[in-house]
Image (cartoon, coloured by chain):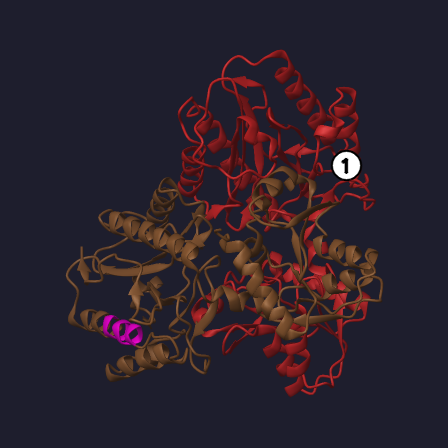
Chain colours: A brown, B red
């Protein structure tokens, strides 16, 4: 008998609950609800107990939730409005539940927690737990890895296509529109985040939006983009130069490319999550660019574009096999521009597998 | 002297704070931070006091925040990582602040509140308040109304354009890609939400995603879309029929169109927020379709696609002049499809102004 990935995920969560002394966990973070149940609506709460699991959502999602929950053993309750967490609390109270109940402390707001406590009538002692489902999501299963490969391939294909469209006079926002259109046509439900196209001095802002600025000769262009495909994200960055680059720009690019390789080489199960960041910084220091690298080296990727693990200074947790992370060192020079190279990498015992296969050679267009 | 809209907004918030007995309000909800400060980064916290205001964000946003805060009187503190709320708490503790401090209870998670309390060292008594900035945002100022007009016009223009592309064989996702591409080219930073294109029986799901299903002759197509333009959203829906519609489908359309007009006519300052919903339901009841209308009639619109006020049953708050709301009755018939018509409407003393000007006649393509 084949057990569906979602039933395995719920089973693993129940192990965490048992070890953590929790009889009922209320999951309200929508990506966590999707991970465990397959429900793709944007409003709902999943109550997981050892012997059952129930999704609470509203009437807009009745038909859809019925279809999506069919392969699972999760029950469905339709409630009024979008107060899933409170409804789940009320349900526990109605059943005179006397076990140990928990909610997602890093996801439930102070006001929601108050409503939930009120709805559950004071006899249930709620405990806040943090990161339980997120901990499971650090390790991707086969179904997830397959989806992430596809999302990464789509992102890689599109970025290669649009590089040929970069020329003086084209606007940043036009290129962003092309990128998002091509990802959509390739099956994406949308961009994983607002596509960044930052040219010239704007490249010194790591999170620059695409504007109506047109590309000009002799400037760097940073493109940071990703697709959501079958609910999983990709996230990649390439930097090109319009014209023949001066030697200092080539030097920046070489430094970032070397930093990226060095960071990737540290990725193995059991290595500390800070290792890729240290490796990237060491390389940049050798080029005198350590102060130009103003963010951390990467982050986990999956249903959300930023998830666990974080790859920055002070992260002592070990890397897991089958995690997918970004590796994205960059340098940012105020007034001049930026260089960033980013790939999505699967951590495996035999060595890292880079999922994004767009070329990384320095392109002078 | 011209006082910028943002300085007026902060001044109005300070009045609310004074009336509410709060000396320092920590604003962490990013749309609220943008509304008050103009900061467009996705990570930061704004501490508003009577005599000063300070934005806490991290090093990725240093240059950008400096530029965006220039027209305001808001100070900037760069902190490590993305722990703005905790950093603001620590800052109050460092200054030996002894006033009454509050945070946004409906936006701060239980875990964040705990970190904030810890960082502020136990001497500050934090109080959770709900909806203060959101209350200000219900009433749009001139600058906002101008932006919303533009976002509504862009949405209207694009939906009219793409209706001509609907024919048998075109896939839902292709139409969604066209819509999002054209909005982007028109200056949008992205869609206000994942564009809905739901054809045939899929139209019975109010929140159906666009899939690879191709349009077929003799079915309804529901398109629900909107743009984010200069940080403000539009949200509109049109429904068309591929072929010559049978009389029952025409009847559904007529019922929804009448319900929408009736709902719009109730929109005036001071009317209860439940009035448009009752009016729409009354019309649909006359057609025997009241059970087919499975969601509320509309919602406020602005920086976020769903904001205050809510236009549903039981909403007794009065409507404000200069609110912008959607009016979107619909009917959903399982197995057959759906009809929804949605416009964005500005509430004015002299009568409602519909911002989305795409035609509403029943189109048989």
Whether residue B84 sits left or right of residue B255 in the image: it is: left
Q: Quadrant of residue A271?
A: bottom left
Q: Which segment is the magenta one?
A: A257-265
Q: Is residue B73 visible to us here?
A: no
Which quadrant holds the C terminus of chain A? bottom left
The local crowd at label 1, few if under 14, some if 14 to 19, many if 20 or more residues have their Cα within 10 Å, is: many
Tag 1 subunit: B
Give the SS element for disc 1: loop
Residue B308 within the segment the image draws in magenta: no
Whether residue B269 sits left or right of residue A340 in the image: it is: right
| Secondary structure mostly seen in the magenta stretch | helix
Percent across and percent down for residue A232 are 44, 54
Residue at 75% from the left image edge and 53% from the top image edge: A87
Whether residue A265 sits left or right of residue B196 in the image: it is: left
Percent across and percent down for residue A25 are 67, 64
Tag count: 1
Residue at 30% from the left image edge and 69% from the top image edge: A352
The residue indicated by pointer 1 is: B268
Percent across and percent down for residue A113 are 73, 64
Vertically, is B6 above or below A154?
A: below
Q: Is residue B22 visible to us here?
A: yes
> Closer to the camera, A195 or B337?
B337
Vertically, is A288 above or below A87?
A: below
Q: Quadrant of residue A36?
A: bottom right
Residue at 31% from the left image edge and 80% from the top image edge: A279
> Closer to the camera, A94 or B222?
A94
Percent across and percent down for residue A297 are 37, 73
């Amino acid at each position: 008998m084949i057990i569906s990935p979602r039933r395995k995920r719920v089973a693993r969560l129940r192990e965490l609950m048992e070890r953590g002394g929790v009889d009922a966990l209320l999951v309200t973070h929508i990506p966590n609800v999707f991970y465990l149940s397959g429900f793709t609506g944007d409003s709902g709460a999943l109550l997981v107990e050892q012997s059952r699991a129930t999704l609470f959502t509203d009437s807009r999602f009745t038909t859809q939730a019925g279809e999506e929950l069919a392969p699972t053993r999760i029950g469905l309750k339709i409630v009024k409005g979008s107060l899933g967490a409170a409804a789940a609390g009320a349900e526990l109270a109605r059943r005179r539940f006397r076990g140990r109940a928990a909610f997602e402390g890093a996801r439930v707001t102070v006001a929601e927690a108050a409503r939930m406590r009120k709805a559950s009538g004071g006899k249930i002692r709620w405990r806040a737990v943090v990161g339980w489902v997120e901990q499971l999501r650090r390790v991707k299963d086969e179904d997830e890895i397959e989806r992430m490969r596809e999302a990464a391939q789509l992102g890689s294909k599109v970025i290669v296509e649009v590089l040929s469209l970069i020329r003086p006079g084209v606007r940043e926002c036009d290129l962003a529109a092309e990128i998002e259109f091509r990802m959509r046509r390739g099956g994406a439900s949308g961009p994983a985040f607002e596509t960044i196209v930052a040219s010239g001095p704007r490249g010194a802002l790591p999170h620059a939006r695409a504007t109506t600025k047109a590309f000009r000769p002799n400037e760097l262009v940073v493109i940071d983009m990703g697709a959501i495909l079958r609910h999983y994200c990709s996230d990649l960055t390439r930097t090109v130069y319009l014209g023949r680059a001066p030697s200092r720009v080539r030097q920046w690019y070489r430094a970032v490319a070397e930093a990226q390789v060095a960071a990737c080489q540290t990725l193995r199960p059991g290595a500390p999550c800070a290792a890729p960041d240290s490796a990237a910084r060491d390389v940049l220091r050798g080029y005198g660019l350590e102060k130009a690298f103003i963010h951390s080296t990467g982050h986990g990727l999956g249903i959300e574009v930023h998830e666990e693990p974080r790859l920055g200074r002070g992260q002592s947790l070990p890397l897991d096999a089958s995690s997918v992370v970004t590796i994205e060192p960059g340098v940012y020079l105020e007034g001049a521009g930026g260089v960033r190279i980013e790939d999505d990498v699967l951590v495996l015992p035999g060595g890292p597998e880079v999922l994004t296969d767009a070329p990384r050679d320095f392109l002078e267009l």
